[in-house]
Amino acid sequence: MGLFSFLKNAGAKVFGHKAEENDESAKIDKIIALKEAVLGLGLEIKDFDVDIDKDTVKVSGTVESQDVREKVILALGNVNGVATVVDEIEVVVPEPEAVFYEVKSGDSLSKIAKAHYGNAMKYNVIFEANKPMLKDPNLIYPGQVLRIPPLKEED
């Protein structure tokens, strides 16, 4: 449970033409778009609920694992127009949390892996940890936030 900050003007553009309006209809459209952004990735979350107030998204529900929790947070936070995600997701099987890392200009997954793991060849650990949000290890962008999980013995 916590509060996570993101770059408001970076990320996927999932809000339609009503995104700048402040009426209830636009809010409902945004909530639907955010839920579709998560569910479209195949992330399973029971009792899934999303609310939005300006550039802050509040998410709740129950997930089986820590990595799914973090992927839901990132799927919502890496949306253009979202600056903050308030996390109220419960995890059935708690695990160590990953570090969230904001991609800088000039970064690559191997450069990030070298900085966090001491081995550039561990880039695939980061790539796998961010699937299905990442489809290609070469397609990351400044401002995007990625999960950097702790290494497991088999990594």
Image (spheres, rainbow, N blue to C red):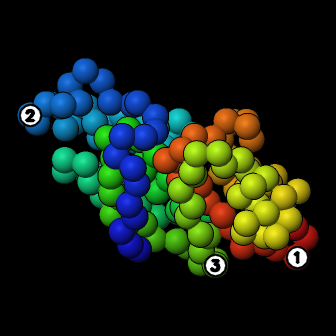
Disc 1 marks which amino acid?
Glu
* Mark 2–mark 1 distance (CA, rounded to whole Å): 51 Å
* Quadrant containing the C terminus in the rendered view: bottom right
Looking at the image, which residue is at 36% across and 40% down?
A: 9
Residue 139 locus on image (x, y percent)? 67, 36
Looking at the image, which residue is at 13% across and 30% down?
A: 21
The residue to which callout 2 is attached is 23
The residue to which callout 1 is attached is 153
Looking at the image, which residue is at 66% across and 64% down?
A: 148
Of callouts 2 and 3, the N-terminal one = 2
Callout 1–callout 3 Cβ contact below 8 Å: no
Indicate the quadrant where residue 60 lies: bottom left
Q: Is residue 107 above or below residue 116?
A: above
Residue 49 locus on image (x, y percent)? 33, 53
Q: Is residue 114 left or right of residue 20?
A: right
- Mark 3 is surrounded, within 10 Å at the Cα level, by few (under 14), some (14 to 19) or many (20 or more) other residues, namely few
Secondary element at image label 2: loop
Secondary element at image label 3: loop
Residue at the outermost front position = 106
Residue at the outermost top position = 17
Q: Is residue 84 visible?
A: yes
Indicate the quadrant where residue 152 lies: bottom right
Disc 3 marks which amino acid?
Pro
Residue 44 locus on image (x, y percent)? 55, 51
Residue 96, numbered label: 3
* Mark 2–mark 3 distance (CA, rounded to whole Å): 40 Å
Indicate the quadrant where residue 116 lies: bottom right
Q: Is residue 68 visible?
A: no
* Mark 1–mark 3 distance (CA, rounded to whole Å): 14 Å
